[in-house]
Image: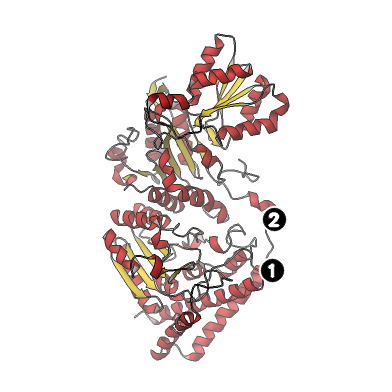
Amino acid sequence: MREITFSQATLEAMAEEMRRDSTVFILGEDIARQGGIFGQFKGLPQEFGYERVLDTPISETAIVGSAVGAALTGMRPVADMHFADFVTCAMDEIANQAAKIRYMFGGQARLPLVVRAPDGVIKSAAAQHSQSLEAWFVHVPGLKIVIPSTPYDAKGLLKAAIRDDDPVLYFEHKALFAMKGPVPEEEYIVPIGKADVKRPGRDVTCVTYSVMVHRALEAAEDLARDGIEVEVVDLRTLVPMDIDTVLQSVRKTKKVVVAHEACRRGGAGAEIAATIAEEAFDYLDAPVVRVGTMDVPVPFSPPLEARVVPRKKEIVEAVRRIV
Amino acid sequence: MPDRDTLIHIYTTMVRIRAFEEKVEELFLAGKIPGFVHLYIGEEGVASGVCASLDRSDYIVSTHRGHGHCIAKGASPRRMMAEILGKSTGYCKGKGGSMHIADFSVGMLGANGVVGGGFNIAVGAALSAKMRRSGQVAVCFFGDGASNRGTFHEAMNMASVFDLPCVFVCEHNQYASTTPSTYSVSVKDVADRAVGYGIPGVTVDGNDVLAVYEAAREAIARARQGGGPTLLEAKTYRIKGHFVGDPERYRDRSEVERWREKCPILRFEDRLRADGVLGDAEMEGIRSAAHQEILEAVSFAEESAYPDPDDAFSDLYASCAQGEGCGI
């Protein structure tokens, strides 16, 4: 199979969906003339024009708010947030408007809206350009949360998100944009709400998503040399969460590490750990261990950043603590 | 001057809104309405004057004080009243209440519990209309208080930059909850802020429904023809408190009484009488029909069932089933 980057995979997904459905359009800062700050929109305006690939003012509130209005009136907008950190500027539009409109209006409305949010730690981007904020949105009923780890999943899930009739937050880790992986030429969709076992194993389950899937796979490789077989479950979507796949794995391994790059406190990992405790307590042979960024803002200087952001080593240590 | 049918339509709309709101106040004080309600009494000229120039397919985005906008855009008082009483036959099946009434079938995209939450939704509806080349216009109603939100700025700028078919209608009713606009708004006329966005800004007497009508007609026509957005300010007054039950310690009764004398309905009646459009008997007929309609709406609402408690688990997502988290 051919290999393309995560960024190219999302670009193909956008182009395919825009060809398929004339109501799909994308709006955001620096996307058309610049091609996106990570090059993830390059070439789209040449094929689809500058109206459907719409450069906007620096107005996150208006980007997401107008996407809500457009979605309510027959369009399928994709709103790009530049950096996931800037969703803070559009919180009312996401949490009070997009998430609630369908419900509070008694099902009258459909809200086919995708918010793309490049998140995560990369190259000393410091505190306001490095966050992983997915847990905030997991807490708000009415949203769907997609968070892929590979080019294959990125493409299939972005296509699913665009076709979905509900508001979807699509978190794409900045460190993954350049990563290459197999992506078929032919069309496919990855359904929202299905986890994927990225590596089977019998001893410990590592429930993870986004960039930490790769750190977990590296950790599993190391641990395998010592005869410890880690099963890596990539959730791929946090809402809806495929808890069945998680529980199936937990019942087999009886030990769990939950790993994400977001801060540990109040992270999605807490929800996952609590659900495992409620649903599979009798199967557990050890406490569920969480791995996440330490509870400080992400610092700038490389040694400081490395000190607080978990990588392979932290997952290996977490596994060794419970086997 | 609009034609006779339009004049009668505008008058009827104002009277229906007033009758609806007076009944809502009565029901609230009688303890029949859960939550809280914000009344549009005294401001009827704005919604009635603006919506008279809109087609059914045009969009409006409303506020927490939204009953008048709903009625003016063609929503059914029966289903509104049922919603306000929390009944299953309401517009939102009892999930929204007074602050969240919407009727998508008449382009009423929703009241909004967040002050200033509607600006960008209206911008998006206008962007969508422009992209679909549908000829529709989006009107955003908001108050003097909302004009102090950052959402106002982003919406005005984006609507102007993209020449969107959007009309921003400021209902300058003098108070943001308890705070007077003379204290909290940096300009005397909110429409002056239009200069900062390179769009026309127009201030009219909001209690003169024909002045509102003429200004809105021009702004809506300009938007429809591709001429871009307008900021239209209607100076009016919130005769009732911020919500029913508001102790109103922030203003003198004499001020309220002065504005009562400027009632937009009484003023319009004088005009209709003087111009020979409607006589007293005809106006009485319209008022009495409106009261009858609202009484029927109340009966409908009161006789309707409350929703099944488990209906709390439907309508969250379009693409999945019922249940806690609605299937998720």
**Image location of residue B238, percent across then percent down:** 47, 74
Element carrying mark 1: helix
**In the depicted view, which residue is nearer to us: A269 or B81?**
A269
Label tally: 2
**Image location of residue B198, percent across then percent down:** 26, 60
**In the depicted view, which residue is nearer to us: B152 or A166?**
B152
Badge 1, how many Cα within 10 Å: few under 14, some, many 20+?
Answer: few
**Looking at numbered disc 1 in the image, what kind of residue is underneath it?**
Glu
2 or 1: tag closer to the N-terminus = 1
Q: Is A53 drawn above or below residue B267 in the view shown? A: above
Residue shown at 55% from the left, 45% from the top: A140
Name the chain under label 1: B
**Looking at numbered disc 2 in the image, what kind of residue is underneath it?**
Asp
**Image location of residue B275, percent across then percent down:** 38, 89
Q: Quadrant of the C terminus of chain B?
A: top right
Residue designated by label 2: B308
**Image location of residue A17, percent across then percent down:** 41, 38
Residue shown at 52% from the left, 42% from the top: A137
Residue designated by label 1: B303
